[in-house]
């Protein structure tokens, strides 16, 4: 297969694959979880893997961040795309809003739609699923009049569900960012919209380590787009840092900064230099 992605069919991640491939998902295979999709890449069964990284309302996707840290040095980000997302409440045909007793969806969708659910379904149980499309599929399989899913209108059509309420997210401008991953190798050519991701680790307990790293970027007028920390399980209170900077690693200023940054930390791993695409149109073609 060419692409593995977080499934089942009908996820927003499938839409990201379409965006990255120019519309085709014929060589893409869905997987039940982020780790399973990444394992397809690391084992050589797929050429690329596409998974969600962050939502503009609910924040980072921990499973993806964990996989990036666990496989640093062996996989690279080769593209990013942000898509506008919209959520609907759906259930089996004949279900009324007053019938709903359980609301099933991905934790990020719960976070974005929680206010609406608390207002309109205050007694409903919140149940998590691996993806919004999985929530729709499980709701369709159960056929229970008490079950409802939060996903996209396209997922409702795909799994034969009836939309009970549309656009129930807290923000109409919500976006989710996805990354395309490949196995390690030479970076792609530069473009006019590149970013570079680095994984930084230091055994020093000096709180100024991260400040020094960022200072090397600052003095060269390189913008930092994103910073995340990830705990080191065997070393309580110490962290890996993921830093995303504007520009390509082959550009002079960023390349110089990386050389300088390496001198102040124990390890610095390139996670990739890649084009970053943004599509602000609300995505209604997948869940």
Image (tube, rainbow, N blue to C red):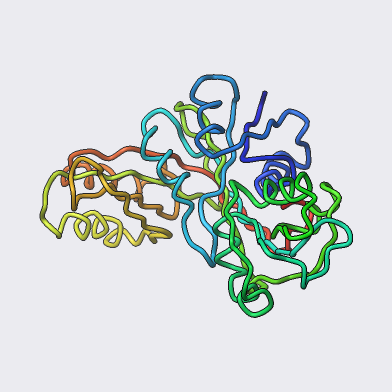
Foreground residue, 152 or 205? 152
Q: Position of residue 242 (x, y in %)?
A: 35, 49
Where is residue 114 drawn, in percent x and y? 59, 70
Quarter of the image holding residue 3?
Answer: top right
Please indicate whether residue 254 sits to the left or right of residue 216 in the image. Answer: right
Q: Which residue is at 41% across, 46% downward?
A: 197
Of residues 91 and 49, which is closer to you in this image? 91
Residue 139 appears at what percent x and percent y?
Answer: 74, 51
Q: What number of labels is visible?
A: 0
Q: Indicate the quadrant containing the N terminus: top left, top right, bottom left or bottom right.
A: top right
**Residue positioned most to the bottom:** 119
From the viewer's perspective, is residue 220 above or below residue 130?
below
Q: Nearer the viewer, residue 50 or 139?
A: 139
Nearer-the-camera pick, 255 or 137: 137
Q: Is residue 48 left or right of residue 240?
A: right
Q: Provide residue 9's location: percent of width, then percent of height.
A: 73, 40
Q: Is residue 141 left or right of residue 33?
A: right
Q: For the view shown, which residue lies furthest in the top direction?
A: 44
């Amino acid at each position: 297969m060419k692409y593995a992605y977080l499934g089942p069919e009908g996820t927003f991640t499938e839409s990201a694959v379409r965006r990255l491939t120019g519309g085709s998902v014929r060589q893409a295979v869905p997987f039940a979880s982020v780790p399973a999709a990444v394992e397809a890449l690391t084992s050589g069964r797929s050429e690329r893997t596409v998974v969600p990284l962050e939502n503009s309302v609910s924040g980072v996707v921990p499973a993806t961040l964990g996989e990036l840290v666990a496989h640093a040095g062996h996989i690279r980000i080769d593209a990013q795309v942000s898509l506008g997302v919209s959520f609907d409440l759906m259930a089996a045909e004949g279900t009324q809003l007053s019938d709903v007793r359980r609301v099933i969806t991905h934790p990020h969708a719960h976070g974005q739609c929680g206010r609406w659910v608390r207002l309109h379904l205050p007694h409903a149980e919140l149940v998590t699923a691996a993806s919004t499309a999985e929530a729709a599929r499980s709701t369709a399989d159960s056929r229970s009049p008490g079950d409802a899913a939060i996903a996209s209108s396209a997922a409702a059509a795909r799994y034969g569900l009836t939309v009970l309420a549309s656009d129930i997210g807290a923000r109409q401008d919500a976006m989710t960012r996805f990354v395309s991953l490949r196995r390690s190798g030479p970076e792609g050519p530069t473009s006019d919209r590149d970013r570079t991701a680095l994984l930084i680790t230091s055994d020093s307990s000096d709180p100024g380590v991260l400040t020094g790293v960022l200072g090397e970027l600052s003095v060269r007028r390189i913008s930092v787009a994103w910073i995340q920390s990830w705990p080191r399980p065997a070393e309580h209170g110490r962290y890996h840092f993921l830093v995303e900077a504007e520009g390509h690693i082959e550009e002079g200023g960023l390349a110089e900064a990386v050389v300088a940054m390496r001198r102040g930390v124990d390890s610095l791993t390139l996670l990739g230099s890649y084009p970053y695409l943004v599509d602000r149109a609300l995505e209604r073609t997948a869940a």
